[in-house]
Amino acid sequence: MKVGITEVAVRAQVSEATVSRVINRRQGVSRRTREAVEQAMTDLGYERQTRGQLVAVITELVSNPFFADICERIESTLAPHGLKTVVCPCFPGGVQELDFLTSLADRGVAAVVFLSASNTIEGSDPGAYELLRSRRIPFVGINGQFEGVSEAPVFSTDDLLAAELAVDHLYRLGHRRIGMASGPVGNRPADRRVTGFVSSLAKRGVEDPEQWVVRQSYTVEGGQSAAISLLGRGATAVVAASDYMALGAIRGARRQGYDVPGDVSVVGYDGAMIMDFVDPPLTTVRQPADRLASEVARSVLALVGNRDVPVGELLFDPELVIRASTAAPKTE
């Protein structure tokens, strides 16, 4: 059985944080306590980690407030344990991602977090995972199960439920022609949201619900293009796959002469607090950034501390936040 910092802490009668400080040679530990921890590690046969103190977060959209919030929360949780977080912005699944990981692995990175990176892309290059496996570097995913990888923990928002929350809200307002501005095909979260959206419409008796889905990029421009297409089909409401796409949908509706929410209702997805201050304040489905980041940090600390963690994907419930971008339709 692996000996981790929990066992060392119990043996030395100190906290896990104190053991972490000793392992990472941080200040704030008395000589007597340090000696007790060192002796406990020797007695238990604890293998001191040779990895460094860096935890890499691989992500694409660092400009997105939601992703920035996740990164900040992970960093603030890991810092007291002597781990430093470095954010690596790169195109998911691309060459740059593998280059980042190769460079970090050579420098002794402690762990890697994939935040909507190659873990979200169907058919992504497995080189990143193979590299980490070969170097025995632990990794964790956010919002996407790794393809063909079963040994890593993954923490995701329940995208099927997110779509249902948005559709149910709009249906209760009276909308019956609801469209979805979704992300690209092959993006796991986007595909899940489409599946949830189509299922929500179908169970409400909508015929051919797929006709109300438009795929685009996760950008303001993508949301604008998708919304214009959906409005041309007679949609009175748009469910966007991200808050940025929702802002684009609002812009697209206005450029077509529609008022939001007077003529068209718009629902976003992510839930960054800044969306309370746009015009109009955006109704959105909020991802639980605090709980996602907390569980990711907890798993990273366990893995770096040589402790086992549950593997597979764990789903977290999102929350509907109603603001001023949705209202009852004028006519149906």
Image (tube, rainbow, N blue to C red):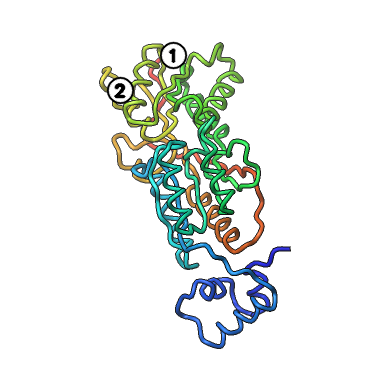
Q: Secondary structure at mark 1?
A: loop
Residue that protrudes farthest toward the bottom in the picture = 32
Q: Position of residue 139 (x, y in %)?
A: 55, 50
The residue that disc 1 covers is 332
Q: Position of residue 57 (x, y in %)?
A: 45, 50
What residue do we see at 58% from left, 39% from top? 146
What residue do we see at 51% from left, 74% from top? 21
Q: Is residue 305 above or below residue 64?
A: below
Q: Position of residue 36 (x, y in %)?
A: 61, 83
Q: CA distance from mark 2 to mark 1?
A: 21 Å
Kind of residue at disc 2: Gly
Give residue 18's quadrant in the image: bottom right
Of the numbered discs 2 and 1, the one sitting upstream in the chain is 2
Q: Position of residue 5 (x, y in %)?
A: 62, 69
Judge the density around disc 2: few (<14), some (14-19), many (≥20) Cα neighbours within 10 Å: many
Judge the density around disc 1: few (<14), some (14-19), many (≥20) Cα neighbours within 10 Å: few
Kind of residue at disc 1: Glu
The residue that disc 2 covers is 252
Give the number of the mark in front: 2 or 1: 2
